[in-house]
Amino acid sequence: MPGVTFMECASGEEAIACATEFKPNWVTMDIKLPGLNGFESTRAVKQAHPPARVLIVSAYNEPQFHELARASGAIGFILKENILALRVMLEGELKENASPARDGTGQPAQ
């Protein structure tokens, strides 16, 4: 995707360091990570860079994961099998941010 940089981190601690240095807009965080788990890492990423929108991802659909994700500061929780939905969401945000501002009628703002 043009204008988008993807980074991969090998652990929660590395994700925190990357968030501190690179100030990402979006972070996808797996629950199972070496070192800190995804919930702990999300809390630390949000402390390091509060504007980051963190989405927690897992292959396991445990009911408590949704609440734990929100409690850690994530915008939500998504199953890995639904990762296509994440891509669509990100592409939509890119298009929205790239298009000129619109007024309430859908016309370009003046």
Image (cartoon, helix red, strand yellow):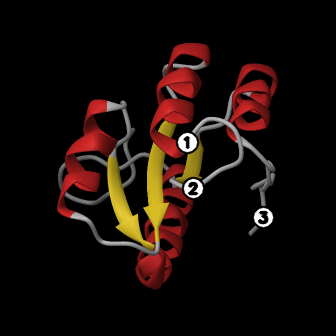
SS category of the residue bearing label 1: loop
**Of residues 41 and 89, the one drawn nearer to the viewer in this rendering:** 41
Tell me the quarter of the picture where residue 24 sits: top right
SS category of the residue bearing label 2: loop
Front: mark 3 or 2:
2
Circles 1 and 3 in contact, beta carbons < 8 Å: no
Is 2 left or right of 43, judged from the image as shown? right
Question: How far, Cα to Cα, is label 3 from label 2?
Answer: 30 Å
Question: How far, Cα to Cα, is label 1 from label 2?
Answer: 6 Å
Q: Position of residue 105 (x, y in %)?
A: 19, 57
- Tell me the residue at 65%/50% (across/down): 33
Q: Where is residue 61 in the image (x, y as percent from the top left)?
A: 30, 71
Q: What residue type is labelled 1?
A: Asn
Q: Which of marks 1 and 2 is nearer the N terminus?
A: 2
Q: Position of residue 58 (x, y in %)?
A: 46, 66
Q: Mark 1 points at which residue?
A: 37
- Tell me the residue at 52%/50% (across/down): 97
Is 7 left or right of 61, judged from the image as shown? right
Q: What residue type is labelled 3?
A: Pro
Front: mark 1 or 3:
1
Q: Name the residue under label 3.
A: 2
- Which label number is shown at residue 11? none
The quadrant of the picture occupied by the N terminus is bottom right
- Which label number is shown at residue 32? 2
Circles 3 and 2 in contact, beta carbons < 8 Å: no
Q: How many C-alpha atoms fall within 10 Å of the one at disc 3: few (<14), some, or many (≥20)?
A: few
Q: Which of marks 1 and 3 is nearer the N terminus?
A: 3
Circles 1 and 2 in contact, beta carbons < 8 Å: yes
- Tell me the residue at 45%/84% (across/down): 81
Q: What residue type is labelled 2?
A: Lys
Q: Earlier in the sequence, mark 3 or mark 2?
A: 3
